[in-house]
Image (spheres, rainbow, N blue to C red):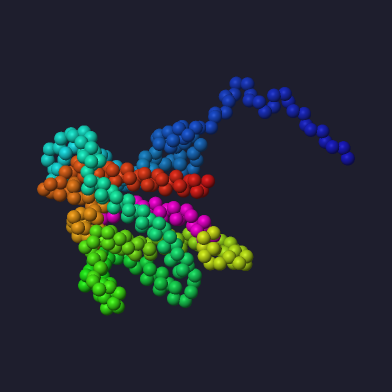
Amino acid sequence: MLDKAPAPTSPGAGAPRPGASPAPPPPGPLRRVLRSVTPGPAPDAGGAALYRKWWLPWLWMAPAVVGVTVFGVWPFLNTLILSFTDAKPLGGAAGFVGLDNYTRMFGDSDFWLATRNSLLYAVIVVPLMVLLPLVLAVLVEKNLPGIGFFRSAFYTPVLASSVVVGLSWQWLLSDQGLVNTWLQKGHLIKEAIPFLSDSWLILLSAMGLTLWKGLGWYMIFYLAALGNVPKELHEAAAVDGAGSIRRFWHITMPGVRTSMMLVGTLTGIGSLRIFTEIYMLGGSTGGPGGADRTLPFYIRDVGLDPLTGNAGYGAAVSVALFALTLGLTLLAQRLTKEDEA
């Protein structure tokens, strides 16, 4: 059978007809953004979009935009403006002082002490908060009889307020508290350990309180992430003779690496904002002579005291805390991108 010859094509087939306008180029990114915010539906819109009012999406967004502006953008801008003034906590005339507050801050030994405490808090708490909840999640991941009770028990501290937990730890760690009493009755110590009077022990006790209260919260993060780790990898590794520790190191941890980065970022930001734990264990002075004050604690002392406070200087320290937190967040984001690459 003979093959059919292709049908002849007329010259210029496929080319635009004379007088016809060429097809418009696809819109660029800027044009798409302008089209999304300008009144009227898009040229290629169809269906209900042709009859939707242009302001309707903005109406739905208005509550969120107002909330972010009133409680986020404006306080930040106001703090930034205050940092260049000598405003008082109770109001009144505020004069422009330029960079004097920042110059004072960099020469203030109390500021550097508070910065050291905040950074030390983050350096110790963040690695432990990344690893311990993961270990806890691995232990309670299996569906064993009664495992729900242990999951609830580990999560219970998250539900308690920081003040209640702080009062409980005060009772546990005081000189006549439960910990010292048991240690003395067990003849392990002769004198009470000064958990609430020694500056270093106060800081370490506050770190322990933060860890104890946050373990259950981040355990939930890891439980969700562990559900996405293929079980076949663990089974194959077990067949090859890999033990539980080796499987944890080479399969579990790489499988939840993104969650570990998220937990590390959230914990780092939270560690730089620690206030309640130091206040509850170290008192209103932040430990003996203020030796355990963190940056939020120091901001309260220098910026909000109604008699001697300087709201402008407190705002400058707040800006420094924001810069430190932003730097930590950008570092974590960069590490996450490098890890994914």
Count every numbered label the image shows and give the total. 0
Judged left or right of residue 16, residue 177 is: left
Instruction: Give residue 213's quadrant in the image.
Output: bottom left
State the image coordinates of residue 253 (x, y, percent, origin top left): 50, 58
Q: In which quarter of the image is the N terminus?
A: top right
Q: Does the image show residue 182?
A: no
Judged left or right of residue 14, residue 201 is: left
Above or below, 336 against 250 in this view is above
Judged left or right of residue 140, residue 180 is: left
Span colored in magenta: 251-275
> Which residue is found at the position 54% from the left and 60% from the top?
251
Main SS of the magenta segment?
helix
Instruction: Give residue 136's quadrant in the image.
Output: bottom left
Of 303 and 108, nearer the camera is 108
State the image coordinates of residue 89 (x, y, percent, origin top left): 15, 45
Extreme front residue here? 190
> Which residue is found at the position 37% from the left and 71% from the top?
153
State the image coordinates of residue 250 (x, y, percent, origin top left): 54, 59
> Which residue is found at the position 42% from the left and 48% from the top?
332
State the image coordinates of residue 328 (x, y, percent, origin top left): 37, 47
Of 213 and 104, nearer the camera is 104
